[in-house]
Amino acid sequence: MTIQWFPGHMAKARRQVTEKLKLIDIVYELVDARIPQSSRNPMIDEIIVNKPRIVLLNKTDKADPRMTEEWLRYYREQGVQALAIDAQAGKGMKQIVSLSKEILHEKFERMKAKGIKKPRAIRAMIVGIPNVGKSTLINRLASKKIAKTGDRPGVTQAQQWIKVGSELELLDTPGILWPKFEDQTVGYKLATTGAIKDTIVNMQDICVYALRFLSRYYPVNLKERYGLEEIPEDIVELFDAIAKKRGCIMSGGMVDYDKTAELVLREIRTDKLGMLTFDDPAELSSEE
Ligand SMILES: Nc1nc2c(ncn2[C@@H]2O[C@H](COP(=O)(O)OP(=O)(O)OP(=O)(O)O)[C@@H](O)[C@H]2O)c(=O)[nH]1
């Protein structure tokens, strides 16, 4: 599956998630901690109705810790339940179970009051855009390898309940939702972090976006990585400076912009420029 959504695909994805909602008590909305807003489905509030939800900021090992704190504060202020996790390393797994129990405590107490002596386990499902770490989280919570994972977007395929201890059951098929494509900046952020396949985006355009962003918000990381004394304001000059430092020069001495873009994006995705976050909760109020 490539990350290319057409109205028909979106309607189908929505229908599938809506169907599964009937089976569960709580939704785990998985987002990428580097782009918590851009990696959300734009219609999530309309799709997940009348179900408690926890926003899980995943891949926190790759995100700017200061910004992750800002995001958690933002969610708290909005009255949204949120946790910072690292599904790959298994960090934050216990909190997911304990917060779910806390949120569903009243519902399960009501079940007990109705005479159900031994209430069933909490039933949960994971939803999120492609490549956000849904399968990795399922495997972590299950503490054994079940779902297929991959470093390419679009690996999740095939429904069963997976036991997470005695108190939680997870649907083995996550709900795949679409990101907000029509917004160009969102597209750039998704591409920068590797959520969109490189074959469907222009690497140079993405890199221009990423370098401008880093120049503004993470200048020290940029200078240190590429040995720059100053960051040229002109984006072509910046490309040239990085290309020269890294030998991305074609025969004849011309700068190889494709190779430079590829190198910079690969280094951003593999954390060579440090822990970076591209969405800022402070910008949300001005966008809305
Ligand atoms: N660094 C880091 N990588 C992670 C984390 N969680 C998942 N990944 C990686 O992200 C990539 C995508 O993970 P998957 O679990 O396949 O993502 P998915 O959401 O199931 O993807 P689809 O099948 O495309 O819907 C894999 O390379 C994982 O190893 C995390 O917390 N930290």
Image: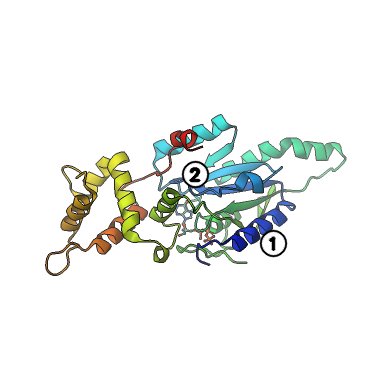
- First along the sequence among labels 2 and 1: 2
Q: Is residue 129 above or below residue 112?
A: below
Q: Is residue 154 above or below residue 236?
A: below
Calculate the distance from the C-alpha at mark 2 to the C-alpha at mark 1.
30 Å
The amino acid type found where label 2 is placed reads Gln
What colouring does the structure picture have? Answer: rainbow
In the rendered structure, the answer to whether residue 136 lies left or right of residue 111 reads left
Q: Quadrant of residue 111?
A: top right
Q: Callout 1: few (<14), some (14-19), or many (20+) C-alpha neighbours within 10 Å?
A: few
Q: Residue at x 51, y 37 (%)?
A: 288
Q: Is residue 19 above or below residue 73?
A: below
Q: Which mark is on residue 288? A: none
In this rendered view, identify the residue nearer to me: 62 or 200: 200
Q: Residue at x 26, y 41 (%)?
A: 219
Q: From the top left corner, tell me how far across and down residue 35 is, in percent.
A: 45, 46
Q: Residue at x 39, y 41 (%)?
A: 64
Q: From the top left corner, tell me how far across and down residue 95 is, in percent.
A: 58, 41
Please give the residue where the numbered disc 1 appears in the rendered image.
160
Q: Is residue 162 visible?
A: no
Number of marks:
2
Callout 2 secondary element? loop
Please give the residue where the numbered disc 2 appears in the rendered image.
37
Q: Quadrant of residue 278?
A: top left
In this rendered view, identify the residue nearer to me: 138 or 33: 33
Q: From the top left corner, tell me how far across and down residue 220 is, in percent.
A: 25, 41
Callout 1 secondary element? loop
* Residue lying at the far left of the rendered structure: 252
Q: Is residue 51 above or below residue 250?
A: above
The amino acid type found where label 1 is placed reads Gln
Q: Residue at x 34, y 60 (%)?
A: 203
